[in-house]
Image (tube, helix red, strand yellow):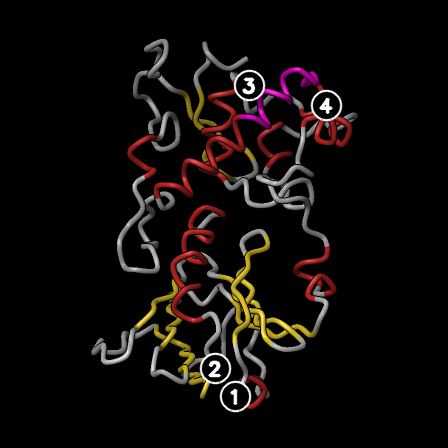
């Protein structure tokens, strides 16, 4: 599933190709995504200019006059930019295209159809999908004191806690595993039993891991490639995720896997307490 770094990589990839351009038409080949694409959307977007491409959590926001096109990549979605003159045959799951006034095409591909393309009038924060989201992990609003205060009395495992989008957005499974390893925290420890000092370390690690993943283009997943068609390379740096039974890179003990919140969780029993 594309996580925050993959979505941010996509945002940065498509932004220079669509910002400032007008949409001449929207072509919808399949409306049945996670939520049906509104019937009125083609008419609404025709002739509108994209003023910017933003991200909130894992949602991409194409800012248009008086509103935003909200795009989520779901479990396996991707966006491709086809520059004028590019010949690329349609694939089976190419469900939507935005065609711009210079003949650039933004193509949405989603084999599992768990993503969404929706419209929201301003302010976009009023949308039910957006309004409950927590702070962005790379912003100053996400800090150890706020996280520590919110964790008091919480019995949920620390990994589940930091993956809650109401607590902080975009810390998905891969990056939660990695951040907790670097912070030396056992992912099964109750969130309410983690000290302020350890939250300071954890926040630092979350920011560093996500920033590094964005820098190198995200993590290579089976269903994800960057907006330019090239895979990310952060997977080459993974310390624990996907390495069950292999030796810890720090202490050489075999890494252990458990299930938390129905998600694979890999950690070192020696290095993480």
N-term mark: 3 or 1: 1
* Mark 1 residue element: loop
Residue under label 4: 192
* Mark 4 residue element: helix
Residue under label 2: 22
Q: Is residue 201 magenta?
A: yes
N-term mark: 4 or 2: 2
Tag of residue 47 = 1
The number of discs equals 4
Residue under label 3: 185
Q: Is the Cβ of the residue at disc 1 closer than 8 Å to that at disc 2?
A: yes
The residue sitting at 31% across, 46% down in the picture is 232
* Mark 3 residue element: loop
Q: Quadrant of residue 147?
A: top right
The answer to which of 61 and 256 lies nearer the viewer is 61
CA gap, disc 4 and disc 3: 13 Å
CA gap, disc 1 and disc 4: 52 Å
Task: Give the magenta range.
Answer: 194-204
Q: Is residue 95 magenta?
A: no
CA gap, disc 3 and disc 1: 52 Å
Q: For this view, does 56 lie left or right of residue 238? A: right
* Mark 2 residue element: loop
N-term mark: 1 or 2: 2
Q: Nearer the viewer, mark 2 or mark 3?
A: 2
């Amino acid at each position: 599933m594309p996580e925050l770094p993959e979505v941010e990589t996509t945002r940065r990839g498509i932004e220079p190709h669509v910002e400032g351009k007008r949409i001449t038409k929207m072509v919808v080949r399949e409306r049945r995504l996670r939520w049906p694409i509104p019937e009125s959307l083609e008419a609404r977007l025709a002739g509108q200019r994209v003023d910017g491409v933003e991200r909130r959590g894992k949602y991409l926001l194409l800012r248009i006059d008086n509103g935003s096109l909200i795009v989520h990549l779901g479990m396996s979605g991707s966006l491709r930019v086809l520059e004028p003159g590019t010949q690329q045959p349609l694939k089976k799951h190419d469900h939507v295209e935005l065609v711009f006034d210079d003949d650039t095409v933004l193509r949405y591909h989603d084999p599992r159809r768990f993503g969404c393309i929706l419209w929201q009038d301003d302010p976009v924060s009023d949308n039910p999908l957006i309004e409950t989201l927590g702070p962005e992990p790379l912003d100053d609003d996400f800090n150890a004191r706020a996280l520590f205060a919110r964790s008091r009395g919480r019995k949920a495992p620390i990994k589940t806690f930091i993956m809650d989008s109401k607590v902080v957005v975009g810390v998905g499974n891969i990056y939660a595993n990695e951040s907790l390893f670097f912070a030396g925290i056992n992912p099964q420890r109750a969130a309410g039993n983690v000290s302020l000092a350890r939250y300071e370390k954890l926040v630092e690690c979350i920011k560093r891991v996500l920033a590094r993943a964005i820098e190198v283009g995200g993590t290579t997943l089976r269903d994800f490639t960057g907006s330019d068609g090239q895979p990310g390379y952060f997977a080459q740096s993974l310390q624990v995720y996907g390495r069950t039974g292999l030796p810890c890179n720090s202490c050489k003990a075999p890494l252990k896997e458990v299930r938390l919140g129905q998600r694979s969780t890999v950690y070192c029993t020696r290095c993480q307490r």
